[in-house]
């Protein structure tokens, strides 16, 4: 039986102030209540929640690395909230419910582990990975048989924009769509930066805002080209950017610490003072 043949059950909102029971059905009823009575929850759509789902996944990754059980529980709960929230809205649309999602997952796990649930025997994790990929290919062939064709770059997995950009470029390169060396990638970066500057130079803020979508496209082109340079250098663009983020946070923290030591709040400082402390932070890094 396909999901479309099932009767979709919309959870009934919990009444009164609910207790934390640890039960999935009670969580679904709580979510239904929030959708019924909370103004913010009521106005959300499956598309509006996408950034939150991505953000919560990253925060879960950070929590796991911290090895703090309380933080990990909290972030796992936040990820679960996204699943519950989406299921509630799809149930309201009559498309599917949490039971359908769980059933689909159970079927997939059994189907992809024949070495566990069937007579098939695999000797190690490498063999499991090979068999997993074979089963995924069979699933894709079944999708194509249903009219859902797959093109070469569809294999790029969801992730941050930088991760997807680098993976897209890698896959295209395997098909021969690439520069031979790094010079072509650098020239393309220069070209895209020049086009961005053209959209920004000698224009007022009002003019830029009036053409903001074109500016956004040019900015995206610059970032995509920069990722290409990173790929040519065998550097991971995501890691390089995260390194910069952590460096910025560290230097800004230095500014706050120095201002606090002088009895000042950062809100009471100005750009000249903060810039001087920024340079001092860079000197501190070099001497550490």
Image (tube, rainbow, N blue to C red):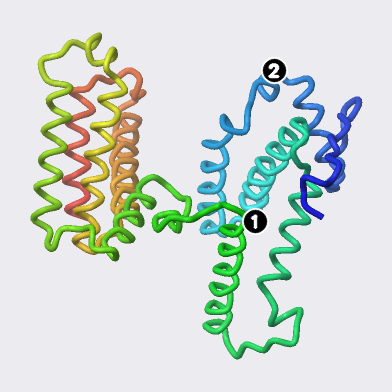
Residue under the point 82% across and 46% down: 5
Q: Is residue 7 above or below residue 156?
A: above
Residue under the point 69% across and 82% down: 115
| Spot occupied by residue 159 in the image (x, y as percentages of width and height) | 45, 50
Q: Is residue 224 left or right of residue 64?
A: left
Label tally: 2
10 Å crowding of disc 1: few (<14), some (14-19), many (20+): few
Pick the residue in front: 123 or 60. 123
Q: Is residue 46 left or right of residue 88?
A: left
Q: Is residue 124 above or below residue 133?
A: below
Q: Residue 39 — which label?
A: 2
Pick the residue in front: 274 or 100. 100
Q: Is residue 238 left or right of residue 74?
A: left
| Spot occupied by residue 188 in the image (x, y as percentages of width and height) | 13, 45
- For disc 1, the marked residue is 69
Mark 2 to mark 1 CA distance (whole Å): 32 Å
| Spot occupied by residue 131 in the image (x, y as percentages of width and height) | 57, 78
Which quadrant of the rendered structure holds the N terminus? bottom right
Q: Secondary structure at mark 2?
A: helix
Residue 208 image-quadrant placement? top left
Residue under the point 65% across and 41% down: 82
N-terminal-most mark, 2 or 1: 2
Residue under the point 74% across and 50% down: 101
| Spot occupied by residue 6 in the image (x, y as percentages of width and height) | 84, 46
Q: Is residue 119 above or below residue 244?
A: below
Q: Secondary structure at mark 1?
A: helix
């Amino acid at each position: 039986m396909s999901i479309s043949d099932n009767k979709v059950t919309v959870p009934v909102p919990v009444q009164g102030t609910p207790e934390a029971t640890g039960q999935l059905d009670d969580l679904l009823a709580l979510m239904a209540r929030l959708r019924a009575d909370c103004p913010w929850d009521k106005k959300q759509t499956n598309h509006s929640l996408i950034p939150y789902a991505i953000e919560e996944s990253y925060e879960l990754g950070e929590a796991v690395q911290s090895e703090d059980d309380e933080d990990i529980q909290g972030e796992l709960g936040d990820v679960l909230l996204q699943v519950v929230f989406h299921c509630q809205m799809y149930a309201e649309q009559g498309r599917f419910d949490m039971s359908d999602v769980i059933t689909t997952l159970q079927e997939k796990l059994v189907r992809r582990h024949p070495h566990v649930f069937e007579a098939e025997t695999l000797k190690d994790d490498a063999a499991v990975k090979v068999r997993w990929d074979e089963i995924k290919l069979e699933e894709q062939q079944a999708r194509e048989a249903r009219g859902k064709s797959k093109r070469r770059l569809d294999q790029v997995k969801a992730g941050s924009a930088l991760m997807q950009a680098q993976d897209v470029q890698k896959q295209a390169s395997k098909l021969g769509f690439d520069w031979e060396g790094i010079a072509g990638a650098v020239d393309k970066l220069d070209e895209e930066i020049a086009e961005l500057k053209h959209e920004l130079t000698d224009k007022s803020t009002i003019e830029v805002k009036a053409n903001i979508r074109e500016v956004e496209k040019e900015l995206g082109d610059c970032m995509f080209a920069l990722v290409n340079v990173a790929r040519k250098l065998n550097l991971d663009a995501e890691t390089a950017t995260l390194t910069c983020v952590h460096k910025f946070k560290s230097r800004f923290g230095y500014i706050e610490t120095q201002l606090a030591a002088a009895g000042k709040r950062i809100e009471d400082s100005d750009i000249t003072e903060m810039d001087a402390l920024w340079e001092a932070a860079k000197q501190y890094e070099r001497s550490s």
